[in-house]
Image (cartoon, helix red, strand yellow):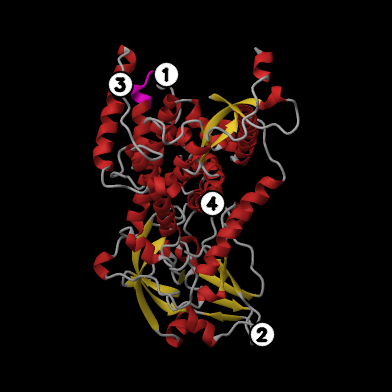
Amino acid sequence: MTTNKQTIPPAEQPIAVSKRVSLPEDSFEVSSERFRIRTRRDVLIFGASALAALTAGTVLLPDETLQRLGVHRKLHPPGKDWLLDKAIDIDDDVAEALYSSNRRVPTYSKSQVTGLKNNYNGVTPGPDYIPTWTLTLSGLQSGLTLSLDLRTLLKRFALHEEITRFVCVEGWSEIAWWGGIRFADLLQAFPPVSQAKWARIESSVNLDANGNSDPYYVSLDIESAAHPQSLLATHFHGDSLTLEHGAPLRLIIPVKLGLKNVKAVTGITFLADQPEDYWRVRGYSRFDGI
Amino acid sequence: MRLLSVPSSTGPASSSSVAVVRVQRKHHILVRWAHWTTIPLLLGLILSGISIYWSAPIFQHPTDATGNFDRAADIGIWLCAHVPGLHHYSTPPDWLYNHLSLGPGMLGVALRLHWFCAYLFMANGLLYLLGLALGGGWRALIPQRDDVVAGMRMIRYYSLAPFAFVLRRPLVHPMHSGKYNALQKAAYASVVIAGVLVVLSGWAIHKPMQLHWVAAAFGGYNAARVWHFCLMCFFILFVVPHVVLVLADGWDTLRSMITGWSLRTRNSSGGTP
């Protein structure tokens, strides 16, 4: 058979030339050898990538989830936290880029107001701190540290009302009616040092579920604080703030997640660099613009 | 496969006869890349997404005697009460979250993983669209006038196929001219649209103030959360028949998503999956 085949002269042109014209342009002929080699190569690459992805995916899962899946060894390569921190940092940068001081958040009518639950799982302090409550401002251009009581604040600044959506990081949201002084007015009356871009906000609501000390503090960018809808609220649904909603004065900043809306604000410090944040050290993001 | 003689430049004439196959270029490399990488990303998004859902369920009922208001917890409670072997499960309300998410009470880690996967998912989606454009694959997804009738024929075919298989009766696959049959076209086109919608509804939930017009387009913040949830369900519902049909269809179809090449050329008879 082979000798017979040898006698056939090689064709000058491939046989399929005329056929090829009628076929779709993305169909073509290859030797089955080449097809086999390419298939084997690609399937091997695919299998190796799938294994790598499975490993990487498993490593990225939280330890608690892995334990549930029966993996009891702690998988903590050095890059794991870095990578996931990077993701929330990028997300925070996106939030910062999306923010515009000219963009107002939607407002609602009084008939659209819903209740607002007290979502704090620590102990709300008793009313004892209220008579001696003051708001302490530091990092001011004047170089002074000021302590302002509620009467001074309400006498000096105009009261504004707004009905806005309060959005929690957990996913729920409520529409609430607030009254208070504008943060922007406070910034104008007591300008921060010129290089300040951030504020550290502190609170009197400082107890965990067992009544132990658990200081609450957040970082806030001054640009968001200066938004015309950012309030230092003293009123809720037409009445004075109750203890559970942060009496006597709380931050209401609808361009941020609820966790930045600090209750019973006691101190605002203006800083050049972003300060630490209660939630950031617990693995959450820290800019939280929404 | 057939034998084709080609002129040989190197060896003697004996090596000039080689076996040849006709190959159809089926999926652009970017489409293949995006197809496979979507699997771990979507899985990560669903697992972390259900963990995020746990902290504020959308589907609620008034708080009952046990203090529960979450319908997903109800499902877990029901399963543990009725499914043999689950009667001694320690935390029935958490059953669903323990099996379909990273776990309950893990909002912080779930959010980190969700953003990580979400940004990669969006980048991947762009690569997929680029691959559709470069490979011309988009043409196969554009609906045509006769798709409705052809779709009906395909539904009839798929409903009869298991019986025909069991009874060993021949069943002719409806003809179609393009890359996909009408049902495939509908499924693959809608999965692209669902991908776009799931990203948009995600942004609506994530930035309801700066992007309040996106939230408004979905019917508001709370409605956008329902959209996002239902789109996740759509992806899960898509995957089941997708995998079943690919396995039923055979190695050529699966191989074409790995190597990009199919041995079924388009002008050959119908049944091109």
**Looking at the picture, do discs 3 and 2 lie on one chain?**
no
- The front one of B249 and A117 is B249
The crowding category of the residue bearing disc 2, from other C-alpha atoms within 10 Å (few below 14, some 14 to 19, many at least 20), is: few
Residue A143: which numbered mark, if any? 2
Say which label, 1 or 4, has the lower sequence index: 1
- The front one of A220 and A288 is A288
Residue B242 vs residue B33: left or right?
left
**Looking at the picture, do discs 1 and 3 lie on one chain?**
yes
Residue B79 drawn at (x, y percent) = 36, 27
Residue position marked by numbered label 1 in the rendering: B85
Type of amino acid under label 1: Gly
- Magenta-colored span: B80-84
> What residue sits 66% from the left and 48% below the top?
A81
Residue B217 among those drawn in magenta: no
Q: Secondary structure at mark 3?
A: loop
Q: Nearer the viewer, mark 2 or mark 1?
A: 1
Quarter placement of the N terminus of chain A: top right
Say which label, 3 or 4, has the lower sequence index: 4
Q: Is residue B67 visible?
A: no
Residue A116: quarter of image: bottom left
Residue position marked by numbered label 3 in the rendering: B171
Q: CA distance from mark 2 to mark 1?
A: 69 Å
Write down the chain letter for disc 2.
A
Type of amino acid under label 2: Gly
Q: Answer yes or no: do the residues labelled 2 and 1 have beta carbons within 8 Å?
A: no
Say which label, 1 or 3, has the lower sequence index: 1
**Looking at the picture, do discs 2 and 1 lie on one chain?**
no
Q: Is residue B17 above or below residue A228?
A: above
Residue position marked by numbered label 4 in the rendering: B127
Type of amino acid under label 4: Leu
Q: Nearer the viewer, mark 3 or mark 2?
A: 3
